[in-house]
Amino acid sequence: MAASDCAHLIVAAFADYNAQFRVITRRAPWRFDARDSKGSQRDAVERIELYDRLVSQTIAQLRLKLGEQALDRDQWAHIRDEFSVLVEALPDAEFTKTFFSSITRRLFGTVGVAPEIEFVATDLDPLGKVTTAVGTNTYLNHGSLLLLFEDVLGDVRFHSAWRDFDRSVAYVTAEVSRYLKESEERRAVLRVEVIRPVFYQVARAYIVGRIVGRDFLIPLVIALKNTDGGVLVDAVMLSESDVSIVFSFTKSYFHVDLDRVGEVVLFLKSVLPRKPVSELFTVLGRAKQGKTERYRELMRHLEQTRDQFVHAPGERGLVMVCFTLPSFDVVFKLIRDKFPYPKNVLREEVKAKYQLVFKHDRAGRLVDAQEFKQLRFPRALFAPELLEELRTETTLTVHEAGEDLIFDHMYIERRMTPLNLYLRSATETQAERAALDYGQCIRDLAYTNIFAGDLLLKNFGVTRHGRVIFYDYDELCQVTDCRFRDMPQATNPEDEMRGEAWFYVADNDVFPETFINFLAFNDAQRAAFNRVHGEILTAAFWRSVQERLKEGEVLEVLPYHPHRVRVASSA
């Protein structure tokens, strides 16, 4: 088969992937109108699985057509050159190049990079060739914010009717006015720019845009809810912090039908300047491009720093070796060769749990762990203590090749401050807030059918926004797979004095009353936790959640502040 024919086949395969991706994405408005949250969740999983399925399918076709030339590197060098010419003028051309590289890396089992047969991530700048702006609807301020937002909401069309359009307009206007505070600033609003497609995430729809003033630019995200009585505005987010949480690395990916994703990323960067480009691509559903960009960010950073890889702050994990670059905001995680007591999980089970999280509704409480294979780094970049641990604890994963280390498999996550460390340096108010959000994190996970398993504070992190996130997945399981039991009452003093359980405990038995033993809070923090989240320590709470999940109920966890939900619900 000629190189040009192979190149055309891969271009067509990516076009097929992209078309199917958009077909799934376009179901989102119908799911919203029908209030079909279960369908939205199924669509999310189907879309995530689509990429690997199309890559595998394309590799099978190429093997069949190339025969003995399937692993001919010279042939693939020609295919790469032909492919590069074919995709140069396509929208988001770097996406197609990432797809090509996924094929060759898997086909050849590439270690490090092979620039002659793939497109090297460091050379792929997904925003470098974006010369056009995303399509927006622009609304000019003619002196009345009320009329301005009446126009904004009036252009959003669903099959469902508005529940009370005027009240939603008034609510948005009041929230914006409150945020801008001073009348001079309200008059200084020049226009509102809104990205034309509506963004969807599970059961919510979002209007995404920005407010442009004479000397300011602020984000604008309006959350919409579809109720029995129709659509209403559920929340308005205007601060960079609030909007960043909506577009968080802990949330499920948006379903929004876009012609050119790079244009939207540039728009979002204008109002979220601290958000890494890799995370914006990922949260827009382009997870593979997000991985490519994260690798590019890392390589670019290594060129500019003298930092070495060192152990990540916090207690050493029993299952994972965790390390970081002090000046780069991610953590690298490797599965150890062996797990000491009391861990009894298998290596493949750990991988399966990370895969579960990748496809699951992360509800803003599970970090998005990106899986990387066959990475190569200079050995000199690793601090001696870390290098020694890698040589003794991760020999199944890490290999030395000359002056380099080759990592067969690792996860890369955003770095957070371990909760146990955060509490040591936090003020009393900050610590109490974190203790309460830890409880809310456990609740939120439960509502999405996730039981963390290991509730030690060291397994939870605190983001720069002060949110508590779970990141240690080796004991994670689904709530519906557990049996939540009340603690049996001892019948004699001898039973109470035993160092181990005097009653039978199955592998899936969970005793919520014992959770308090894992909460290394001081008296004030523990009292606050018990006051707000005490029911988490009862089996009745967990059995109630379990029953609702088994009945098929979707228990929503929203990415915006609860106080805004209360205001919106009364509007």
Image: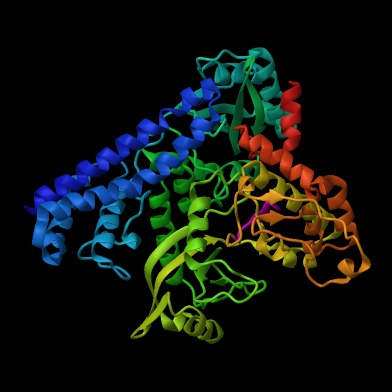
Q: Is residue 67 left or right of residue 380?
A: left
Q: Quadrant of residue 513?
A: bottom right
Quarter where residue 111 is shown: bottom left
Q: Is residue 437 visible?
A: yes
**Up/down of 208 relative to 469, above or below:** above
Horizontally, is 446 left or right of 260 in the view?
A: right
- Whether 327 is among the magenta residues is no
Q: Is residue 213 visible?
A: no
Quadrant in the rendering for residue 385: bottom right
Q: Nearer the viewer, residue 346 or 498?
A: 498
Q: Residue at x 51, y 51 (%)?
A: 356
* 469 in the magenta segment: yes
What residue span does the magenta drawing correspond to?
Answer: 464-472
Question: Can you say whether 236 is above or below 231 in the image?
Answer: below
Residue at 53% x, 60% y: name it: 413
Q: The C terminus appears in which quarter of the rendering?
A: top right
Query: Is residue 117 depicted above or below 149 in this figure?
Result: below
Point out the residue furthest to the right here: 493
Point out residue 440 in the picture as x, y percentages from the top left corner: 73, 47
Answer left or right for 129 relative to 447: left
Q: How many marks?
A: 0
Depicted 400 relative to depicted 120: above or below: below
Q: Residue at x 39, y 80 (%)?
A: 399
Which SS does the magenta portion mostly show? loop
Q: Residue at x 66, y 13 (%)?
A: 164
How is the model colour-coded? rainbow
Q: Nearer the viewer, residue 494 or 150?
A: 494
What is the x, y in percent for residue 497?
88, 71
